Amino acid sequence: LCDIEKERRIPSPSRAAKIAGKLGEPESFWVQLALQDMLRKENLNLVVSIG
């Protein structure tokens, strides 16, 4: 968890969904953040939108 907080690791979408469930937050939001971070890490100027 510390590595995720310090941005040393990006959680997988499934891990992000599990974290969301434990926090009582919407899964779609956390999965969107994980995917957006993956794109940012690869220097891809794209925006993730989950409906």
Image: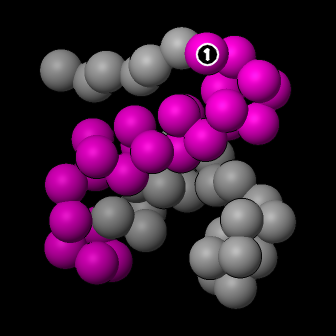
Coordinates of residue 30 in the picture (x, y in percent): 37, 51
As shown in the figure, which amino acid type bears the numbered disc 1? Asn
| Quadrant of the image containing the N terminus | bottom right
Q: Is residue 39 above or below residue 33?
A: above
Q: From what the image shows, is residue 15 above or below residue 34?
A: below
Prevailing SS of the magenta stretch: helix
SS under mark 1? loop
User: Which portion, as a residue range, is magenta?
Assistant: 21-45
Q: Position of residue 23 (x, y in %)?
A: 28, 78
Please name the residue shown 27% across and 41% down the image. Answer: 28
What is the quadrant of residue 24 in the picture? bottom left
Q: How many marks?
A: 1
Residue wearing tag 1? 45
The answer to whether residue 1 is above or below residue 51 is below
Does residue 17 sit above or below 37 in this rendering? below
Q: Nearer the viewer, residue 33 or 44?
A: 44
